[in-house]
Amino acid sequence: MFKVGGKSKSVSSGRGTVPKLRLMLEETMSKGSVDQGAWTCCGVDVSAATLAVAVERVKRDGFDEREFANTAAGHRQLVAWLLQRGPVRVALEATGIYSLDVALALDGADGIAVAVLNPKMVHRFAQTLRRSKTDKADAVALAEYSRRMPFVPWRQPSRQVLELRALSRHIASLCEEHTRSSNRLHAAEGSATTPGCVRQDLKRSMALQQKRILRLRRVAMELVRREENLARQFEQLIGIPGVGEVSAVQLLSELAALDPQMTVREWVAHSGLDPAHRVSGTSVHKASRISRQGNRYLRRALYMPALTGARCDPHMKAFYELLQTRRKTKLQAIIAVARKLLHAIFGIFKTGTPWDGAKLFPQLIPTS
């Protein structure tokens, strides 16, 4: 029996006592107004072709399992099946486009709340429950996670932000391909056994990749300029030393998709720039490193602005040099600058104030 609105309400059915709330699906229901105990927990394991689903039974003595196609029609069938069980909390892993389409379909339905989880976090939780790994077992583990752990609902970004993020990530993959082609061309030009046709083909491939990158960057800039909030944040980003137009689009595409309720510490953890310590007793004392358990696109987008800022901006340069006097390596110092830069972007977005290095590094006096 569950409490709804402070009073316990139930009706009898063939399967025993069922919460009355589950029999009122025709009424529109706010996801935030349902009592925590009234939610049914569900896990969805997403693969390219199928969705393995596990949902709590009414008496909570196990899970009902089904499989749906990972298509638009399969998403509609999944939503209809879940709505038969009343308000449902669905947990699924972030697995790129495959999970994004499922999350969008579920989040658009009244009575369904969605949590999109870090796969590493879910994997470690699942290891405490079972040893086998199958799609069905993963779905049950996700449902258990939804029931036992704090549930943080996913906030759907706008369509423009999702398009910008997809564009930016595709551009990043093209840039990586261009770099690999450049490395292969450099090796080919230094080899006496590589025929000229191979070198010419690599040059043509690089030229085509460069044209595609420039074209997609123009499309991304047009998308940014069409949306008022994106355009405003873009101007704020390029006002930061070391952040050019290319880096600003990369940063904006990742940061604009984040939940506006996130704190700056959650931003840092999301980027994977948070420190991970390995200390236990007197025998284990490993050097601290960044966790790297976050958004690699955001982490990469911060690197070049941090590197440029540490050379050109007096405040970031003073902080970078201070860290080196404390026996930090150059890479460690750059990563620390990147983390500070992320703090600065958070403050600029929240307050609307322009970049001021003196506020970010109040105890440092820049060297002339």
Image: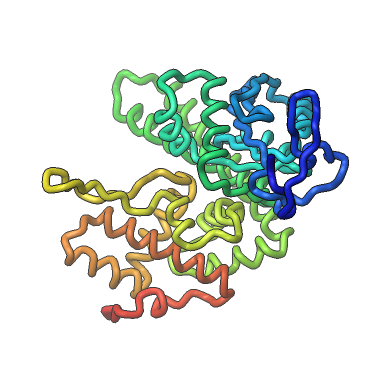
Query: Left or right: 63 with respect to 20?
Result: left
Q: Nearer the viewer, residue 193 or 138?
A: 138
Q: How many marks?
A: 0
Foreground residue among 145 and 332: 145
Residue 361, image quadrant: bottom left
**Quarter of the image that includes the N terminus:** top right
Measured as percent of width and height from the top left, residue 46 is found at 60, 27
Asked whether residue 46 appears in the rendered view, the answer is no
Q: Residue furthest left?
A: 282
Residue 47 x, y percent position in the rendering: 59, 24
Residue found at x 53% / y 33%: 144
* Quadrant in the picture for residue 23: top right
Question: Which residue sits at x=29%, y=78%?
Answer: 364
Please give left or right for residue 181 compared with residue 216 in the image.
Answer: left
Is 46 drawn above or below residue 344 in the view shown?
above
Colour scheme of the picture: rainbow
Residue at the image position 61 percent from the left and 65 percent from the top? 233
Task: Locate residue 191: give its quadrant.
Answer: top left
- Residue occupying image coordinates x 55% and y 77%: 353
Q: Does residue 41 sit above or below 273 in this rendering?
A: above
Q: Residue furthest right?
A: 26
| Front residue (pair 72, 219) | 72
Name the spot of residue 279 as percent of width and height, x first: 21, 48
Q: Position of residue 153 (x, y in %)?
A: 62, 48
Image height of 15 relative to 295, above or below: above
Quadrant (top left, top right, bottom left, bottom right) of the C terminus: bottom left
Residue 23 seen from this side: yes
